[in-house]
Image (cartoon, helix red, strand yellow):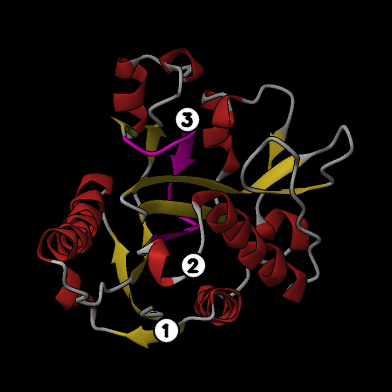
């Protein structure tokens, strides 16, 4: 099993461009697995981890409902927000400035886990990272992502998650609200959940955390939980 994970930060990037990068890496891993099965070989599959940030965009998962977008397309255009239907799980969510987005593109066979354990591990990464900042992140049974005050009427999501898997290869991932303008969540029913709110680290802490330090903490915690070795690669290798 290969637990080396090549990571990079591709910076601020339009959603479609980042999606194309993901798909190229995703397809390349799948192709190795297909050839291994066909030829009875055991060539190692690589793993990747991308940080990015998107301009204002709403994305709708394959099981989502378009009526959870509360704006018309003319209104979206006026506000400078894009909209994409995508192939990840989950419903509708928002991505924009002030968010850290992480896209792990992994062969889960390398880590000996199924999709359920993978999702719980992703949540655990964020829960432990938030703890370093004095924020108590929690799960809600039957929901994905990381929440605050999960058992109260003030339950609010701080990190959304949605993934796609094929042949045990993952793509898409998580988005943690760091200093996100939360008004953009008012124009959707986030994740299709009507009775819970959304928050950010800045709102909870009263200050804006340093994103470089936060990304380093995510990498360190991901390495610990997944038993991985994170190896930096310049972003140009992934574009």
Q: Quadrant of residue 177?
A: bottom right
Q: Position of residue 221 (x, y in %)?
A: 60, 77
Q: Quadrant of residue 210?
A: bottom right
Label of residue 230 in the image = 1
Q: Callout 1: helix, strand or loop?
A: strand
The residue range painted magenta reads 87-104
Read off the residue under disc 2.
112
The residue closer to the viewer here, 19 or 208, is 19
Q: CA distance from mark 1 to mark 2?
A: 17 Å
Q: Say few, some or many: other residues with alpha carbon within 10 Å of mark 3 (under 14 / 14 to 19 / 20 or more).
A: many
Q: Quadrant of residue 95?
A: top left
For image coordinates 74% across by 24% down, the residue present is 195
For image coordinates 43% across by 46% down, the residue present is 163
Q: Is residue 107 above or below residue 70?
A: below
Q: Mark 3 or mark 1, which has the lower sequence index?
A: 3
Q: Examine the rendering and report whether any part of residue 178 can be seen.
A: no
Identity of the residue furthest to the right in this view: 152
Q: Callout 2: helix, strand or loop?
A: loop
Read off the residue under disc 3.
92
Q: Callout 3: helix, strand or loop?
A: strand
Q: Mark 2 or mark 3, which has the lower sequence index?
A: 3
The answer to if 169 sits in the magenta stretch is: no
Q: Examine the rendering and report whether any part of residue 228 can be seen.
A: yes
The residue closer to the viewer here, 211 or 230, is 230
Q: CA distance from mark 3 to mark 1?
A: 30 Å
Q: Are marks 2 and 3 in contact (CB under 8 Å)?
A: no
Q: Is residue 41 left or right of residue 126?
A: left
Q: Position of residue 4 (x, y in %)?
A: 37, 83
């Amino acid at each position: 099993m290969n637990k080396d994970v090549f990571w990079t930060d591709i910076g601020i990037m339009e959603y479609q461009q980042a999606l194309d990068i993901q798909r190229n890496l995703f397809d390349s891993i799948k192709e190795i697995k297909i050839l291994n099965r066909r030829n009875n070989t055991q060539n190692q599959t690589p793993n990747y981890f991308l940080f990015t940030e998107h301009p204002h965009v709403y994305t709708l998962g394959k099981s989502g409902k378009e009526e959870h977008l509360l704006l018309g397309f003319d209104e979206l255009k006026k506000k400078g927000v894009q909209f994409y239907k995508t192939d990840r799980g989950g419903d509708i969510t928002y991505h924009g400035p002030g968010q850290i987005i992480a896209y792990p593109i992994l062969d889960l066979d390398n880590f000996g886990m199924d999709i359920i354990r993978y999702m719980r591990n992703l949540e655990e990464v964020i829960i432990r990272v938030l703890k370093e900042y004095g924020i108590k992140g929690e799960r809600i049974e039957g929901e994905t992502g990381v929440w605050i005050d999960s058992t109260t009427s003030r339950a609010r999501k701080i990190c959304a998650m949605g993934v796609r898997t094929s042949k045990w290869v993952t793509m898409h991932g998580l988005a943690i609200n760091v200093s996100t303008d939360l008004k953009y969540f008012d124009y959707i029913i986030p994740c299709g959940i009507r009775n819970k709110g959304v928050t950010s680290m800045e709102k909870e802490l009263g200050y804006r955390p340093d994103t470089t330090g936060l990304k380093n903490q995510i990498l360190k915690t991901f390495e610990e939980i997944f038993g991985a070795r994170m190896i930096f690669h310049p972003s140009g290798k992934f574009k």
